Amino acid sequence: MTTISCRQLTRRFGDFLAVDGVTFQVEAGSICAFLGPNGAGKSTTLKMLSGIEPPSSGEVEVCGLDVRSRSIELKLRIGVLPEDLGLFDDLTVEEHLSLIGDVYGLSRRVSRDRASQLLRALGLEHGRHTFAAACSHGMRKKTSFAMALLPNPEVLFLDEPFEAIDPVTSKIMRDLLQSVAARGITVFFTSHVLSTVEQIATQLIMIRKGRIVWDTPAAEVPVPLEQHYFDLVEAPVVEEIEWLRSPRS
């Protein structure tokens, strides 16, 4: 069953073409990694898929819903970890989860029980009363991740979930994503952490300058992912900086 489908999806900002005719599908229960360099169109595509940013043209459906005409209904069936994390400085970690429960219409008991489980699983239990303004970046990332999971969505849209977190948290998040995908939740995430992508992704899509350059099951990547990424998306440029090795005069 296809959970995410877009055809000729395009987004313009004035004369700048951020996403150029993107077409792909993601099946239910997949963990799809959406890869590309900064400025390639990853976050813009994710925002269009999740109903945050309207497309300039093209078609996009998520959970069988047209994202443009049924965006409110869609938002109640997905979980999102946005690029800016979407937190309020004057709310505590626990208050963010309670707010999400209210938004999705969960009972206070269900919301409280799910929040407690997520706080324990993500190592946030002792920081549950910490205001977001006082949280480290890692705590903020975990809070936003917990908010995306709490409503038990059909699809998770995650923008750079593994950036700037410690190895233990990364392992916990990887295990959670594999667990929910095994139960049918579709995961669509952007990332620059290729080692993590190799461990959990079942589908790989690569984008360069707003266009898809690769879309395949992860098992069919012909060479190590890092080298394949360099070949298709962005090759590293190595420049000798002689003065860094020169003795002081």
Image: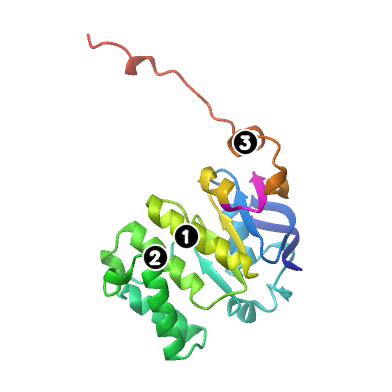
Find residue 75 and name its label: none
Specify the segment rendered in magenta: 200-211
Mark 2–mark 1 distance (CA, rounded to whole Å): 8 Å
Question: Between residues 224 and 59, which one lies in front from this camera angle?
Answer: 224
**Other residues around mark 1 within 10 Å, as few (<14) / some (14–19) / many (≥20):** some
Residue 145 lies, in percent from the top left, at: 46, 66
Tell me the element at label 2: loop
Please determine whether, in this image, residue 172 is positioned above or below residue 238. Answer: below
Asked if marks 2 and 1 touch (Cβ < 8 Å), the reply is: yes
- The residue sitting at 37% across, 51% down in the picture is 166
Q: Amino acid at mark 1?
A: Met
Q: Earlier in the sequence, mark 2 or mark 3?
A: 2
Q: Amino acid at mark 2?
A: Leu
Tell me the element at label 1: helix
Q: Amino acid at mark 3?
A: Pro
Q: Is residue 15 magenta?
A: no
Disc 2 target residue: 122
| Left or right for 26, reference 131 | right
Disc 3 target residue: 224
Disc 1 target residue: 173
Mark 2–mark 3 distance (CA, rounded to whole Å): 30 Å
Please determine whether, in this image, residue 50 is positioned above or below residue 97. Answer: above
Residue 205 lies, in percent from the top left, at: 67, 49
Q: Is residue 205 magenta?
A: yes
Task: Please identify the quarter of the rendering in which residue 126 is found.
Answer: bottom left
- The residue sitting at 62% across, 36% down in the picture is 224
Residue 157 lies, in percent from the top left, at: 57, 64
